Amino acid sequence: MRLSRYFLPVLKETPAEAQIVSHRLMLRAGMIKQSAAGIYSWLPLGFKVLRKIENIVHEEQIRAGHIPMQMPTLQSADLWRESGRYDAYGEEMLRITDRHDRDMLYTPTAEELITDIFRSNVSSYKDLPLTMYQIQWKFRDEIRPRFGVMRGREFYMKDGYNFDLSKEDALHAYNRHLVSYLRTYERMGLQAIPMRADSGPIGGDDTHEFLVLAETGESEVFYDSAVTDLTFGDREIDYDSVDQCQAIMEEFTTKYARTDETHDEAVFNEVPEERRRTARGIEVGQIFYFGTKYSDAMGATVQDADGKKVPVHMGSHGIGVSRLLGAIIEASHDENGIIWPEGVTPFHAGIVNLKQGDAEADAACEALEKALIAAGLEPLYDDRKERAGGKFATMDLIGLPWRITVGPRGLKNGVVELTSRRTGESEEMAPEAAVAKLIEIYADHRVSGL
Amino acid sequence: MRLSRYFLPVLKETPAEAQIVSHRLMLRAGMIKQSAAGIYSWLPLGFKVLRKIENIVHEEQIRAGHIPMQMPTLQSADLWRESGRYDAYGEEMLRITDRHDRDMLYTPTAEELITDIFRSNVSSYKDLPLTMYQIQWKFRDEIRPRFGVMRGREFYMKDGYNFDLSKEDALHAYNRHLVSYLRTYERMGLQAIPMRADSGPIGGDDTHEFLVLAETGESEVFYDSAVTDLTFGDREIDYDSVDQCQAIMEEFTTKYARTDETHDEAVFNEVPEERRRTARGIEVGQIFYFGTKYSDAMGATVQDADGKKVPVHMGSHGIGVSRLLGAIIEASHDENGIIWPEGVTPFHAGIVNLKQGDAEADAACEALEKALIAAGLEPLYDDRKERAGGKFATMDLIGLPWRITVGPRGLKNGVVELTSRRTGESEEMAPEAAVAKLIEIYADHRVSGL
């Protein structure tokens, strides 16, 4: 992409309304624009990152054997009356009346609708296990939306639902989600720690929240510092293996890590003092096992092997897709702007032409752009007639992890400069070497699709 | 994908509420399920096709130089008051009141919001031309939703908006959209004919609708049969070339082709009688040039080269993404079910095991599945213990364009059977030859991403 043809409305001033750094940087980098309280347009740069995160979530869910589908944003109130949540949900549910005076709502979550789809179509244990998920816009009418996409009203969420014959099977689904989430967040360059949490309006006893440690987090968290040493890495997992999934669940959840809702001072004090940590965390996902809560209320049963009708065991599992942009920026930025992890960066590298209009520099930039595109990478080429300082500031602000700087002086020696946004370190090398190095860097960070 | 692990709730009975064939087939093939009047869940098979169509639209828009972004589904009423459309739109606009009693709406289109984004960020002619688009859920509170996804209330639409300095530039954007749409529909296996139409509530004089001929179409259309001989084919287009885009626009819109709204009997009668056709058509897209209607009303101006403030010239351009599934099925089915064009098929080929449990047949099916996946294709392997007749009926119903049938008898001679859904013709060949043939067939039908 040529910057001269892109729509990247970066702001020089820090917007007054933004209280936290991710909100400030998303506005300044031209990623989002508020259209109403807690409701944002995703400008091109923001949309690109949103789509990358969405695709990583899709890839990892499909890898775990979960089936993508999509439910509508508006639902009839009737199903929510069946579960009892229409009255229980409170003012955060946006209630709508259509032209025929029917009660509708903008869905904050979809346990009822997916249970209805299940009960309408599945009647035998032979069709289990089954896990379906969607990534879809949701709405919660927050009384005081704030922190940009971190606590907006319209937000993009992955929500998945498992249907199993027994509690044991449903707990395997729970563990499978936990494993797939660990992998998902790591691909985004995030450490998200599963912590014992409270189930809130979804219900159920077993639940873990995934939290990213950050000073601006909304939750206070307590943990054994040993949990931050755990990494998932590139393990190959058989998601059908009950033992493998359970072992990983135990590895990642045995050490003390809890939100303030479930914090237990006495248990915490058993952790060696030098490893006890109190911090703040941003919630980026949550998994639940809630048994037969919805299947009982809504009559979602199957015939078991003995021909007996039994309610299915269920859980639900969410990832805050739009909120993840904020969480990643909170965890990865400096005073000059965002620092995107390679897995989610909107463009793989920036190309800065120090002397736009110089025939040799222009040709070298175009050749680099072409070579990167041919290798399946997406460069952002700043081809504007701007001072070098302004170009560097824009690249630093929008946070592309790698920058290639091209100027007449270097080209005389046959070199360009490759700079890491994270370390600030630069290396001179031939243009071909820079392309080769970027191909190598991104070999492990490919995301399918747009 | 193994069918035993998929969620494909096919129906044996034809649902009584469905009046047209695409609606019947989408319900029977387990692609959608109605959750409220005119509001559907996209079950896994339907979602897969929806996503493919979405990705084709993205690829072709990006190829034309248009920039993807995304606007929210809910908007504040204020912007719509500025343009005057809040009062003008009528009861099809779903109006919503939030917990703070603010007037909101579920957006049926987004001229106002994109114009607001533009005027907030662009002030110089140097930033033009600019075309941005989104693919997002929309809502129209139809009084009598019907025909499944063809006339639903919640629907998925691509809407793009161009901003140009002059009428001339904006008409190039118009032509560029026309060209990109021709390419888009052809990739989906559709012939969509641009016809002169009426602009309705969007406004403006210049507009073409793209119509797919089908008996169940909602519009009566009149055309010179010579337009159906035109194909876009694999032309390489420079979308920046005014002349190339205009030539294609003229090639495809000069011959008589109009909807009943703009039909002119006198002009029609100049077409040689044997080429005059009257038929019905399904609208799958529309392009508009409406000049300064919104930029005047909302103050979207730029400084021109002389430093003078001038309103920008705009147009908007839509593709009915969710409705396209219905249109494709209306245009491509037979008495046994859907016949997906290769470009949008949810799975590239079905594998039918005639004797599930037979070690040799199972192994051959698994090897085929593995080889197709390794080639980047997605097979659907029917591994259920069902009669062959039932498996064939399911494959015919869901409409995968190619089926590989594997049985012990054929395997003894080293062959499987490759069957075309469209022609019904079968050919015996070695499994490796079947894989090679499918790779060749799909070489021109790759869609990025999920």
Image (tube, coloured by chain):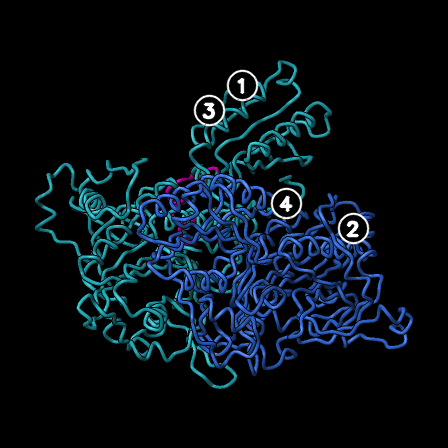
Chain colours: A cyan, B blue
Pointer 1 and pointer 4 on the same chain: yes
- Pointer 1 or 4: first along the chain: 4
Q: Is residue A334 magenta?
A: yes
- Tell me where the magenta segment starts and ends, as one range: A321-336
The chain containing the residue under callout 4 comes to A
Which chain letter goes with mark 1?
A: A
Who is closer to the viewer here, B443 or A184?
A: B443
Mark on residue B77? none
At which x and y percent is residue A319? 36, 54
Identified by mark 2, the residue type is Cys
Q: Of callouts 4 and 3, which one flags the residue occurring earlier in the amino acid sequence?
A: 4
Specify whether residue B101 is painted magenta.
no
Query: In the figure, is residue B77 to the left or right of A112?
Result: right
Q: Nearer the viewer, mark 2 or mark 3?
A: 2
Circle number at residue B245 = 2
Residue that mark 4 sits on: A6
Disc number lying in front (3 or 1): 1
User: Residue A428, labelled with which disc?
Assistant: 1
Residue B206 horizontal/vertical position (percent): 79, 65
Helix, strand or loop at disc 1?
strand
